[in-house]
Amino acid sequence: MKDIICIVGPTATGKTALSVAMAQKYDAEIVSCDSMQLYRGMDIGTAKPSMDEMGGIPHHMMDFLDPRESYSVSRYVSDADRCVQDILQRGKRVIIVGGTGLYVDSLIAGRQFAPFPETGRREELTKIAETQGIEVLMERLRQVDPEAAANIHPSNRKRVIRALEIYLETGKTMTQHDLETKQQPNKYDPCWIGLDYVNRETLYRRIDIRVEQMVAQGLVEEVRTLLDTGIPASATAMQAIGYKELTLFLRGEGEWEHAIDAVKQGSRRYAKRQRTWFRRNGAIHWIELPDAPFDTFSAACRIAEAD
């Protein structure tokens, strides 16, 4: 049996409960791979497990970041890898659980990211985007890295700037850097377990029910509290599904029913993107959940012990 188990899949499939049960059985600790559970004060809308739901299992990479602060996949890999190494060195297994595909894939790969030196170039590029428009930077990117320019939408200003910054700081294009990184063998060889529903409509119904439960648990009050404490609506954390839509509602933009429908729709679309992302990973052992009650824990343990 491997020392690292990754439990992945779309939202609302029971990943959290399964991870805790397996951690209890196999003397493991949990490393969260959810890009929004990192933030403090964002508990209900991110489905962050309560102390009771954690079942006495240590959880890492959760509830430590101020919502005003931006975060990145490179920082996640650095921070989470330290947690993984610490757990392994203490003789325990690691269960990595979550639905942020880019984060978990990058962590397992041990992906190296271009440096973020404080030379002022990023600020210069940002000022150009603000004063002259993003198309000026897009044209510069087309000249040095046409492949990246073709794959980055002009509306993704942050990524356009990052692509140019990598070239200016390293002399390598983002395309070249990404290719060299992907050619390196993965740092870890985990057991991959994926949870999904056979019937997509079952998953979507579960998502709708979860949103309604979040509202009943106080999601609106949670969003209001964040705004009242000075968290700007433009913060990356506040762009999370549920927070963005309810922020608009609290500002008086739109009706209540429309806001809740938007949260449900956004969650379903996110689940669809998650399915597409994880299905590309041929190493995942999928547990296809039926509509009827199913012993997910026993199925997952059989996979882990046989892998």
Image (spheres, helix red, strand yellow):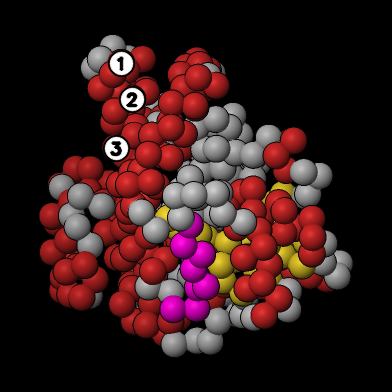
Quarter holding the N terminus? bottom right
What amino acid is found at the position of numbered circle 3 in the picture? Gln
Q: CA distance from mark 2 to mark 3?
A: 9 Å
Q: Residue at x 43, y 32 (%)?
A: 209
Q: Seen in the image, is 280 located left or right of residue 144?
A: right
* Amino acid on which the number 1 mark rests in the picture: Trp
Q: Is residue 77 visible?
A: no
Q: Residues within 10 Å of mark 1 (few under 14, many from 20)?
A: some
Q: Callout 2: few (<14), some (14-19), or many (20+) C-alpha neighbours within 10 Å?
A: some
When the figure is inspected, residue 241 is found, relative to residue 60, above or below; the finding is above
- Pointer 2 residue: 260
Residue 21 in picture, x, y percent from top left: 72, 53
Residue at screen point 31% across, 77% down? 175
Upstream in sequence: badge 3 or badge 1? 1
Tag 2, which secondary structure? helix
Confirm or deny contact between disc 2 and disc 3 (CB under 8 A).
no
Q: Is residue 159 above or below residue 2?
A: above
Q: Which residues are magenta?
A: 282-289
At 55% from the left edge and 21% from the top edge, which residue is drawn?
217
* Residue placed most toward the observer, 75 or 202: 202
Residue sitting at 38 percent across and 46 percent down?
A: 202
Name the quadrant containing residue 33: bottom right
Q: For this view, does 154 lie left or right of residue 186?
A: left
Task: Give the quadrant of residue 173.
Answer: bottom left
Percent x, y for residue 81?
Answer: 66, 65
Q: Residue furthest top?
A: 252
Reading the image, the residue beneath label 1 is 256
Which residue matches tag 3? 265
Q: Tell me if residue 288 is in the magenta stretch.
A: yes
